Image (tube, helix red, strand yellow):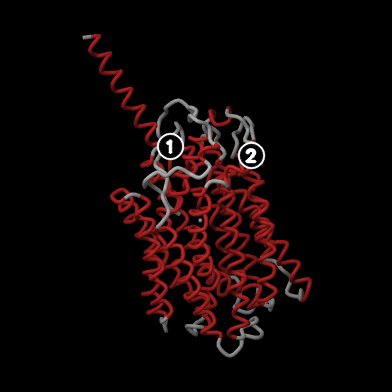
């Protein structure tokens, strides 16, 4: 699963390579395409979030702590998987941008990708308990890569619809807030409720049956939500009339855009930090707090509930201060929140600290995607092509660094604290997961906050064009009234 709005517009380093005059992308139109309701689009986030959050939130517990996969092997697999995923992401986005069908550019990919992701997730959590050694490594690697590839397919297409369906800043901010709200609801299910379902309702803390049953249940829910969204969203047919983007030309223009690197790296700091939180929370509850894994339900539920409430508040802050300033502020709040979490010594103190994490997290949710959408608008205005899929997938390259960060962070627990797996936790597993859950995310967010401080975010190009068009229409209407008079 970032941030939105305005700041001063700067000229990118590759401005001289851009066309001298921005071509007209489309005639002025309504801020939201007819037939597309924000909540119908937003509900898709519920479907795309459930599978990947269960995977990222339970994969270490499932493979390392229960099945006994060595953390160093886990780290190596994550590095390889991240490299593969960083390569296939731009390809998937490129193919999506070039797709031309009677059903639209994005819908076919969403319809195909939903059941494939669900099936891959079920396979991921169905590893036979008899597997060990190289067999376990291969099973883990294959299904991890498949899950991330189909998740990338879905999110490249789903994310590309946001700037297309909602052209005005207010409509876009509202749709983004709704979809982030649905993401938080999905997190309640796929993160907070999952430990209860997998270790209490359908299985135990030492068995894997509960994970398989839960994956089947979540997969069915995700497919229904994604398909409902896919058949409800009305894509803009004008976008399909533009020239198909060329892969190497587009990639060259993207990598020469300084905003791609600055905003991408800053965003990766935030997503990597939260990725560590998702991956390590259940084991932090087990080792650092000394509680059953199922008690993670209370901590996760508290954080998500605060995030839901905070999302409303941060959206109002965005409207008052603008996306860029709010984005920078949220980075600082999120970084600071990890300090009290490190010192939590019980469920109550962990929940209190988690509330602050939820505040900072909701601020990033309310702003980060809007910042990225501004970059997409600016690119389309300058180059005259709608290639949101490839551009978002290129941004996804930085998101794929999460897997490398998570893998290296987990492997470091073996080097620094002696934690190798559930079978060999070492002498300080409690301190190990305090570092994993708090120190590493804090450092990442500090880096992101410093970078964000110096980033200049593009102006709202689409918003400016539509406002100008509306002003022109008002003038013409008044002139017509005077003539009629």
Look at mark 1 in the image and give the residue it sits on. Answer: 167
Which residue is at 53% across, 65% downward?
275
Q: Is residue 77 above or below residue 393?
A: below
Which residue is at 31% across, 48% downward?
319
Q: Is residue 319 left or right of residue 216?
A: left
Task: Judge depth for marks 1 and 2 and give the one in front.
Answer: 2
Q: Position of residue 71 (x, y in %)?
A: 65, 76
The residue sitting at the left extreme is 485
The residue sitting at the top extreme is 484
Q: Residues within 10 Å of mark 1 (few under 14, many from 20)?
A: many
Look at mark 2 in the image and give the residue it sits on. Answer: 249
Between discs 1 and 2, the one toward the N terminus: 1
Q: Is residue 361 above or below residue 470?
A: below
Q: Secondary structure at mark 1?
A: loop
Q: Is residue 358 left or right of residue 111?
A: left
Q: Secondary structure at mark 2?
A: helix
Q: Residues within 10 Å of mark 2 (few under 14, many from 20)?
A: few
Which residue is at 55% across, 53% downward?
48
Q: Is residue 430 above or below residue 118?
A: below
Q: Position of residue 154 (x, y in %)?
A: 60, 48
- Between 104 and 417, the residue placed more toward the observer is 417
Location of residue 349 (image quadrant): bottom left
Q: Is residue 485 left or right of residue 114?
A: left
Q: Position of residue 82 (x, y in %)?
A: 65, 61
From this viewpoint, is residue 171 visible? yes
Image quadrant where one finds the C terminus: top left
The residue sitting at the right extreme is 134
Question: Total of numbered circles in the picture?
Answer: 2
From this viewpoint, is residue 302 visible? no
Q: Position of residue 296 (x, y in %)?
A: 48, 74
Q: Are marks 1 and 2 in contact (CB under 8 Å)?
A: no
Mark seen at residue 264: none
């Amino acid at each position: 699963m970032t941030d939105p709005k305005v700041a001063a517009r700067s000229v990118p380093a590759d401005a001289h390579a851009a066309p001298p005059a921005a071509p007209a992308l489309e005639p002025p139109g309504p801020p939201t395409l007819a037939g597309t309701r924000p909540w119908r689009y937003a509900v898709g986030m519920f479907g795309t979030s459930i599978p990947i959050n269960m995977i990222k939130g339970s994969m270490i517990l499932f493979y390392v702590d229960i099945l006994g996969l060595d953390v160093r092997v886990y780290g190596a697999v994550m590095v390889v998987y991240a490299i593969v995923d960083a390569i296939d992401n731009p390809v998937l986005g490129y193919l999506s941008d070039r797709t031309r069908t009677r059903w639209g550019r994005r819908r076919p990919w969403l319809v195909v990708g939903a059941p494939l992701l669900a099936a891959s997730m079920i396979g991921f959590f169905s590893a036979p308990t008899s597997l060990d050694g190289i067999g376990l490594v291969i099973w883990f690697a294959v299904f991890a890569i498949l899950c991330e590839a189909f998740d990338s397919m879905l999110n490249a297409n789903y994310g590309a619809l946001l700037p297309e369906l909602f052209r005005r800043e207010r409509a876009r901010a509202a749709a983004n807030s709704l979809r982030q709200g649905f993401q938080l609801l999905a997190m309640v299910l796929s993160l907070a409720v999952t430990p209860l379902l997998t270790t209490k309702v359908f299985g135990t803390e030492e068995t894997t049956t509960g994970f398989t049953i839960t994956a089947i249940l979540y997969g069915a829910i995700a497919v229904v939500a994604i398909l409902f969204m896919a058949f409800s969203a009305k894509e803009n047919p004008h976008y399909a009339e533009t020239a198909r983007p060329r892969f190497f030309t587009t990639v060259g223009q993207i990598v020469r855009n300084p905003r791609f690197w600055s905003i991408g790296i800053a965003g990766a700091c935030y997503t990597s930090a939260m990725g560590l939180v998702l991956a390590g929370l259940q084991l932090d509850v087990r080792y650092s707090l000394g509680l059953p894994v199922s008690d993670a339900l209370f901590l996760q539920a508290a954080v998500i509930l605060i995030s839901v409430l905070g999302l409303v508040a941060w959206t109002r802050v965005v409207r008052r201060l603008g996306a860029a300033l709010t984005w920078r502020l949220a980075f600082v709040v999120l970084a600071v929140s990890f300090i009290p979490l490190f010192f939590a010594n019980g469920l109550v103190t962990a929940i209190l600290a988690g509330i602050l994490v939820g505040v900072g997290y909701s601020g990033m949710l309310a702003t980060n995607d809007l910042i990225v959408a501004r970059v997409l608008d600016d690119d389309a205005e300058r180059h005259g092509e709608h290639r949101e899929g490839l551009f978002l997938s290129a941004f996804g390259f930085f998101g794929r660094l999460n897997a490398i960060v998570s893998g290296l962070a987990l492997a470091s627990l073996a080097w620094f604290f002696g934690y190798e797996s559930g079978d060999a936790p070492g002498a300080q597993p409690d301190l190990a997961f305090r570092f994993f859950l708090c120190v590493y995310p804090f450092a990442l967010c500090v880096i992101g906050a410093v970078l964000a401080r110096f980033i200049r975010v593009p102006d709202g190009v689409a918003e400016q064009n539509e406002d100008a068009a509306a002003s022109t229409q008002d003038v013409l209407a008044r002139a017509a009234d005077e003539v009629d008079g």
